[in-house]
Amino acid sequence: MQLRKYLPKGLFARSLIIIVAPVVILQAVVTYVFFERHWDVVTRRLSSSVAADIALLIKATETVKGFNDIMEFSKISGETIGFEIEVARNTVLPEEPPKTLFPILEATISQELRNSLGDYEFWFDTESEPSYVFIWVQMGPDVLKIKVRRSRVYATNWHIFLVWMVVTSTALLAVSIGFLRNQVRPIQQLAHAAESFGKGRAVVDFKPSGAAEVRSAASAFIDMRDRIQRQIEQRTEMLAGVSHDLRTPITRMKLELALFGDKPEFADMKRDLDEMEHMLEEYLAFAKGEDGEVDSLVDLTELVNEIADDTRRKGHHIDVQSTGGNVLPLKRRAIKRCVMNLVDNAISYGDKVAISIWRSRNSVEIAVDDNGPGIPDDRLDDAFKPFGRLDDSRNLERSGVGLGLAIARDVARKHGGDIYLSRGPMGGLRAQLHIPA
């Protein structure tokens, strides 16, 4: 469970781990087997061969009398077996231990020399010169100094194996990464299309591609998108027809009442007709939304100040606090209506309203606060229900049909955001509009 926190979240990165991890593990196992088995065996055999040649050389040297003869014999023998040999008279082996860069390698050489030379004392150096190994053997008062090419003592071509392993692994991984990108790209395109459609943006250039499963999911998304759009269009057309059919008798009734003049007994009927017309317009706006509007870059700070100025001209007190960098691609009329509904709701219940706008890492937040009576916590969700009225907890004198917050939330969700209600810092209600950046 703790490891899950450190794993990448993206599909491409996770798929890459699925490909890379087995390759890395396989290469580690192959490398271990190579160095533990092949390289060790080859080095042991080479060291054993050199040690046997040295042992034979020492035994042959012991049969030669006279230092000059020994020197001549050593020279001829060395040329024959490929050693550079020197005899140092009246010399002892160095007391300091040999330099070691690869302890396992030196242990192998030491073991093979011990097996072949028996009781002879020896000393060797593998680090003084990069291409040679020096082996000194104590022969009585003299020291037999042998210079052997490094390739004769142990395997020196191990780097070729590593280079081939790294090159081939890199090539295979490059091919795998390229193939993986092509497989992940259609999934990313599908996710982007779904996100754009969820924010109410047009998705016109999306086509199914990739593997069969991804194509199937993309085709299902396109079918779902088309069904939703058809449903919205049918609903809008139906409500437009209903609106047209209802507007005609309402207009006729208003004209008939106008013929009677401003008589007090008809004032209530006129008021009822006006309210019916207002309800019809709000309901049609809620059902239709802002489907015909296209996205454009909107400066939300400028939009909020514009709404605040309009509200002040109507005689209401409203404060604005904002930060910069709040430009997003949005449907301007829809967002303006959303914020206006929140502000109208606030000024209906309080005499002071404050708007705050700020940008977080992944969103822009717009909070509308009022100093009204607020809404009980257990009834916050009811405020968003179409035609829902909370007048028993708010203002009993307020008119309206209960669609303001429902329309505002519908606009917010069409942009991929939402609206959250809570107790505000001014004592009343806080309506916070969340818009993904």
Image (cartoon, rainbow, N blue to C red):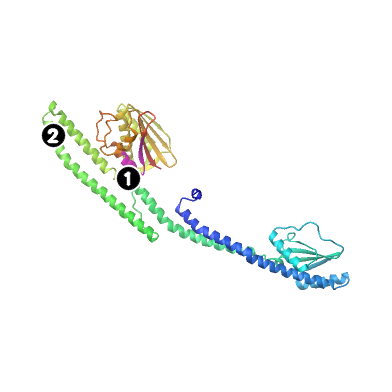
Identify the element where label 1 is drawn.
loop
Residue type at numbered disc 1: Val
The span from disc 2 to disc 1 (Cα, nearest Å) is 38 Å
Residue 140 position, x and y percent, is 85, 65
Q: Reply above or below: 436 against 112.
A: above
Read off the residue under disc 1. Answer: 294
Residue 54 position, x and y percent, is 77, 69
Read off the residue under disc 2. Answer: 255
- Residue 416 is one of the magenta-drawn residues: yes
* Mark sitting earlier along the chain (2/1): 2
The residue drawn where x is 46% and y is 58% is 180
Residue 252 position, x and y percent, is 13, 37
Q: Reply above or below: 243 against 12.
A: above
Q: Which residues are magenta?
A: 408-421
Identify the element where label 2 is drawn.
helix
Q: Is residue 166 visible in this depiction of the protein?
A: no
Q: Reply above or below: 159 against 313.
A: below
Determine which quarter of the picture holds residue 390.
Answer: top left
Quadrant in which the C terminus is drawn: top left
- Residue 148 is one of the magenta-drawn residues: no
